[in-house]
Amino acid sequence: MRFFCAGLLLLVHAVPARSDEAAANHEHHEHHDCAARVIAPPPRERTWADESAAPLPPLPDGVTELKFAEFYKTPVGLRGLEPTDKLRRLAGRKVRLLGYMVRTDRPVEGRLILAPFPQNLHEHEYGLVDDLPPQIVFVTVPDQAGKVVPFTPGLLLLTGTLELGNRLEPDGRVSHVRLVLDAPVVATHLTDANQKGNPQGETQTCTHPN
């Protein structure tokens, strides 16, 4: 017992007390670091497809332009994400969306995911733990049923019928917004020339015959 107490006493004496000057310097550094974190510029935000200056072809008759920024009400309230009146109103109607095809390790046959900015998913490493934004669309490509939809980089202009409501998808995710593509012309791939506003640039169109 005496040995334990002596060892404890030795340990207490071995820890030097912080001097007032050291404490002041430590406090100063803490305030300095905190100030540095506060005044540091925020990270650069990604540019959404909605903000693209790419010239778009005229809207077909009966089709409404829909943007990712129009999916949910902002700011987000206590009830979480709430669909906008426009999104609800367009359920079951023909819409056109401009976005990027998500690159995934485990693509689902006949399906693709459209996002407001380029995204790469690594399901083999992280499973369903990803950084997909809430504003994504699960797209059904009818003529690709039973086949993997080839990945297409760059902006895609998709036209189809909008579907809303929670549904479990084959990849294990739950979709809230879906698009069923139409025929014969449902997707337009905007080349770099188009994205830079060059009217002479070629436009690649994906056609889906009946």
Image (cartoon, rainbow, N blue to C red):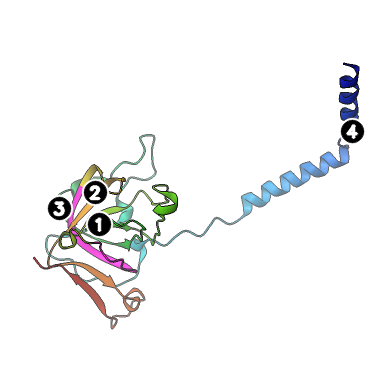
Residue placed under numbered mark 3 in the picture: 93
Question: What kind of element bears circle 4?
Answer: helix
Of labels 3 and 4, the one closer to you: 4
Q: Is residue 16 shown left or right of residue 79?
A: right
Tag 2 or tag 3, which sits nearer the N-term? 2
Q: Residue 141, position in %: x, y?
A: 19, 60
Marks 1 and 2 close (CB-CB < 8 Å): yes
Relative depth, front residue between 187 and 73: 187
The residues colored magenta run 148-163
Q: Nearer the viewer, residue 189 or 69?
A: 189
Q: Going 11% across and 68% down the picture, which residue do you hit?
A: 209
Q: Residues within 10 Å of mark 3 (few under 14, many from 20)?
A: some
Quickly name the residue at label 2: 87
Q: Which mark is residue 14?
A: 4
| 162 lies above or below 16 | below
- Farthest bottom residue in view: 200
Residue that carries the numbered disc 1 in the rendered image: 66
Q: Is residue 169 above or below residue 197?
A: above
Instruction: Rate crowding at label 1 as few (under 14), some (14 to 19) or many (20 or more) other CA atoms within 10 Å.
Output: some
* Three-letter code for the amino acid on which mark 2 is drawn: Leu
Q: Are marks 3 and 1 in contact (CB under 8 Å)?
A: no
Q: CA distance from mark 4 to mark 2?
A: 68 Å
User: Secondary structure beneath disc 3?
Assistant: loop
